[in-house]
Amino acid sequence: MPETPVFSTAAVAAPHTLAAETGQTILAAGGNAVEAMVAMAATVAVVYPHMNGIGGDGFWLVREPKGRIHALDASGPAGSLATIKRYRENGYDAIPPRGPDAALTVAGAVSGWGLALELSRSLGGQLPLDLLLGDAIRHARDGYPVSRSEERFVTGEEAALYEVPGFAEAFLVEGKRAPEGTQRRTPRLADTLERLAHAGLADFYRGDVGREIALDLERIGSPITRKDLETYRARVVEPLSLRLRGSTIYNLPPPSQGLATLLILGMVERLKGLRAETPEHHHALIEATKRAFSIRDRVVADPRNLVHDPASFLTPQALDKEAALIDMKRAAPYPLPRSIDGDTIWMGAIDRNGLAVSYIQSVFWAYGSGCLLPATGVLWHNRGTAFSLDPASRNRLEPGHRPLHSLNPAMAVFDDGRVLSFGAMGGETQPQFLSQIFSRYAEAGMGLADAVEAPRWLLDAKPREREAVLKVESHFDPGLIRGLSRLGHRIEEMDEAYSGRFGHAGMLVKHPRNGRVEAVHDPRSDGGSLGL
């Protein structure tokens, strides 16, 4: 069932209730949306470890009340020792998804928190770091209940994950997933967060915490060095933007796949005569997804390896050309490349002054590399698995370079003054989910709760087959299914009505007429929205 949306002067939305409560607390203490988001990010990093953690990456979009948009890239590069030669000599044809050789990129999330707080202070934020991290420290030290999502979530290479030294002791109960409600304490992670609260977030990279992280990474054989940590800084980047009818939508540039989300929406707008929530409209979204992903896979990479300007694909002429190639009477064939799997959290916040945040944080696959660093309790991500060992690939592994990133938080500003922060988890499928919830809100006129709750589809590949299949949730409209089938889509109905496989999405909108903030988070997650 759809969540009842929050209407308030300020609000947050998160996939875990404890994270939403943290954000509400910070807003009530006079914090702004960025401060609330840093606090939420710390809490959710503790209580949702299968989806994200301080050993992962993050991306930010922040809109000031007067309209300026800030984009922050907190993705980490490959370590100095992470070379194609190293992996080939160790017998790999592809980067392994689990274990020390999967822990090959610097974790950028904490540096991103620091950069965001610098922005916050320039906008008047004054709350101390120990207050922002206080809930996370308490949950790590005193314990938190394992979530429903963590108990049920299915991930790839699970057997290999369980064999990573230290993983089973930290996360399993008698060799199996911990049941929902199991109390879990992570004292070393609590100590690490407490150290950061007093020494500052840069300590994660250049202080005592960074030293312990580097020593543990060296002990397990990761290709990340102490210098890689010391020299890392999150970056301010120029956001990508797309003008639509009645709104402008923003996302992150490469290495994020934000380009794909904008491409889908830009193409579909050019297909005239579509009525929202009809088979033809969903067919257009699906076919635009195929074309957008094809462009993404050719174009998006580390910024130093780009051949084309991503913004050049968002010009009216380029979008007209791509949209004209969509056959509105028949589904195009679509052999999918290797899936960019991934498990993530998206969260949003808008404060009483109208400062808006769209933020996404991840360890890539569920539990990342599975490497829990013993001295600090940090679970390291496996984002580097998205690199290729083919020297000719645009996403080839190179020290200091970033892989193609599935993370892409979104924001839209409407001509009538509404500001929308929205996003979803879901690995490479995120653009599909974002385009569905945005079009339902902006084009179909659905309320936030209905737009997020409505059944979704995802374009996927059947095992050992090259032809794509369209997976739909069990409560998907039978009329839409019949219409899409007639257009040539192979349909597979899933058993669950609200499955995490179809993303954990959220939306918040600031209404200009009354100044109220409306917020909602996905019934597919363990969270919700809260306001003041």
Image (cartoon, helix red, strand yellow):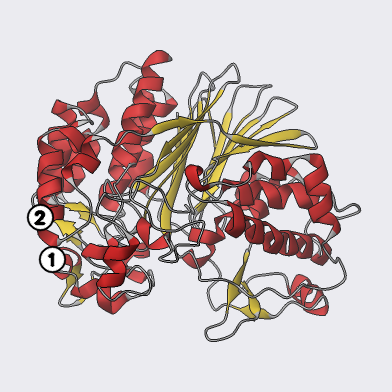
Judging depth in this view, the residue of 246 and 208 nearest the camera is 208
The amino acid type, in three-letter code, at marker 2 is Pro
Task: Report the Cα–Cα distance between label 2 and label 1.
Answer: 8 Å
Tell me if mark 1 has few (under 14), some (14-19) or many (20+) residues whose alpha carbon lies within 10 angstroms of its own. Answer: some
Q: Is residue 478 above or below residue 454?
A: below
Ranked by sequence position, the earlier of labels 2 and 1 is: 1
Q: Position of residue 466 (x, y in %)?
A: 61, 82
Left or right: where 371 falls relative to 44: left
Q: Position of residue 417 (x, y in %)?
A: 69, 24
Residue at x-position 21% and y-position 36%:
230
| Quarter holding residue 431 | bottom right
Residue at x-position 17% and y-position 43%:
226
- Report helix, strand or loop for mark 2: loop
Judging depth in this view, the residue of 230 and 527 nearest the camera is 230
Left or right: where 127 falls relative to 255: left
Q: Position of residue 220 (x, y in %)?
A: 13, 61
Label at residue 166: 1
Left or right: where 182 falls relative to 514: left
Residue at x-position 52% and y-position 25%:
9
Give yes or no for contact between labels 2 and 1 (Cβ–Cβ under 8 Å).
yes
Number of callouts in the render?
2
Q: Residue furthest right?
A: 273
| Quarter holding residue 125 | top left
Tell me if mark 2 has few (under 14), some (14-19) or many (20+) residues whose alpha carbon lies within 10 angstroms of its own. Answer: some
Judging depth in this view, the residue of 233 and 501 nearest the camera is 233
The amino acid type, in three-letter code, at marker 1 is Gly
Q: Is residue 52 above or below residue 514?
A: below
- Report helix, strand or loop for mark 1: loop
Q: Position of residue 512 (x, y in %)?
A: 66, 23
Quickly name the residue at label 2.
374
